[in-house]
Amino acid sequence: MATVSLSRNGGPAVAVARHPRRAARAGLAVASGLVLAAAFPPVDLEFLGWVGLVPLLLACRGLGPRAAFANGFLGGCVFYVAIVYWVAHTISAYSAIPVALAVPILLLMVSVLACYTGAFTASLAWLAERDLPVVWLAPPLWVGLEWLRSWFILGFPWASLGYCQYRYHDLAQLAEVTGVYGISAIVVLFNVVTLTVIAERGPGLRRLVPALVLLTLLMTVVPFLGSRRAAALAHRTAGHLGVALVQGNVEQDHKWDPAYQDETLRRYRDLTRVASAERPDLVVWPETATPFFFQEPGPLRQDILDLAREERAYLLFGSPAYQQTEHGALQELNRAYLVSPDGRELGTYDKIQLVPFGEYVPFQSVLFFVQRLVVAIGDVVPGVDPVVFPLPAGRFGVLICYEDIFPALTRHFVARGADFLVNITNDAWFGRTSAPYQHLAQATLRAVENRVPLVRVANTGISAVIDSDGRIRWQGPLEEAIQHVDEISWPGVRTFYTRFGDVFAWGCALVTIVALAVGATRRSG
């Protein structure tokens, strides 16, 4: 490919094009999606996150908004297929929907998510046409779109870019102020500056000096301060508590089969009795651990109450529940129960953030057939109140299933007085895919954002104990029945993020809106 320019004497001169061909651009977009996906668990090559956007940005360089959107959409599709491919596995394995239909459902979901990546590249191209500083605007634009993705249409903030740095603990401490979005912003800035250093020459490169200076400061000062902050909090203890994690490893195919009901309860009962020998203050079972409706009186409910009384420990567990509307219709709830050492039900919490395609069907006008075919889906309704449970040693909030990937929801529990968090989940739906590893990684940032320990108990794994600095202190195996007793402590501080929430994300969204408004007053160059 060649371009025509003017030579010094005014005649035409042929110069080699600086931008790749269309096929090469598509290849760069695909490569970007794959490289970024490899930065996340279970591959965990987190350094790839710092350069993973470079091929995509290069593919979009010099393009108009429409062509840039197409490349961004392609790169986003590749990334999200590599990240959430397990959605098709879950639907086909645990529903009446065959793989031939599960894959299109996955692709529909991926297409929606990829629109955010396409919007990012298209907006950058549009801003560049109007001679606005895209190096400075790329980070707030990306963060604004990530924040939007957490609640708009699907409300699915899985695999935000900052999560790929969950093991870079010194940098991760920034989440105490900005949430995970601040980490995303730094990673995006690094990618954009890297591309500009590679692609620019002459005066264009000199204009990059302020961004290079800022990036250098961020990459040195933020981890330094993060390390100091984590070290200081490690010596501060406002309270502690012994907790037992009980991972039942009940196969999803057996979970609701009446023939396995006694075996399921026996397994949890035996593991609890072994753990209780170490006298924990709190015993935790996973999401929907009881294969029956605990709210209904009867011998099964009484067995659970008797177990808590016999072992003299508080018992937290998940159970399906239901409520009746004023018109007599039954609505299903995903509920957590707390039982006291004297065998009394102390309180409940109903899951607020429901799982798309698992507990409700998005795009019902299009996917009307899914409601009839997916066995796991009932008439599930969300809870409304982030309950904080009191214990003699401290207070805690419960996050059910994937609620722990929602920063804004999580902070409400701590803002209401929770000293620590418990995540009960049933990741058996995912099988041996990458999802359990990704889920655990994202949970670590909730501990940092709120400076509270997080106890994670999963049916088939991965159960874990996460300290308030985001480090995974203990991590259990996948697909094994185990019990683990640990002691958690908390520093007793309330962070900027807990107090004020997504102020950084709102600020980024505001900067983006202002930039777009300014761009609208300019003609493209």
Image (tube, grey):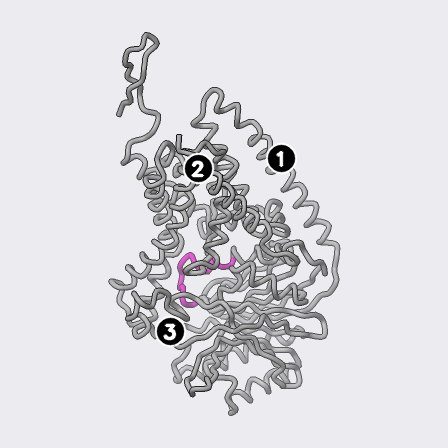
Q: CA distance from mark 3 to mark 1?
A: 49 Å
Give the extent of the magenta segment: 428-440
Which residue sits at x=26%, y=64%? 101
Which residue does the numbered mark 1 point to in the structure image?
Answer: 217
Q: CA distance from mark 3 to mark 2?
A: 45 Å
Which residue does the numbered mark 2 point to in the structure image?
Answer: 127
Residue situated furthest left in the rendering: 100
Question: Residue 505 versus residue 336: which sits nearer the camera?
Answer: 505
Question: Residue 435 versus residue 177: which sits nearer the camera?
Answer: 177
Give, as a three-letter code, the residue at label 1.
Answer: Leu
Which residue does the numbered mark 3 point to in the structure image?
Answer: 376
Give, as a three-letter code, the residue at label 3.
Answer: Ala
Which residue sits at x=29%, y=31%? 21
Question: Pointers 3 and 1 in contact (CB under 8 A)?
Answer: no
Which numbered disc, 3 or 1, marks the residue that appears first in the sequence?
A: 1
Question: Residue 93 versus residue 50: which sits nearer the camera?
Answer: 50
For marks 3 and 2, give the one nearer the viewer.
Answer: 2
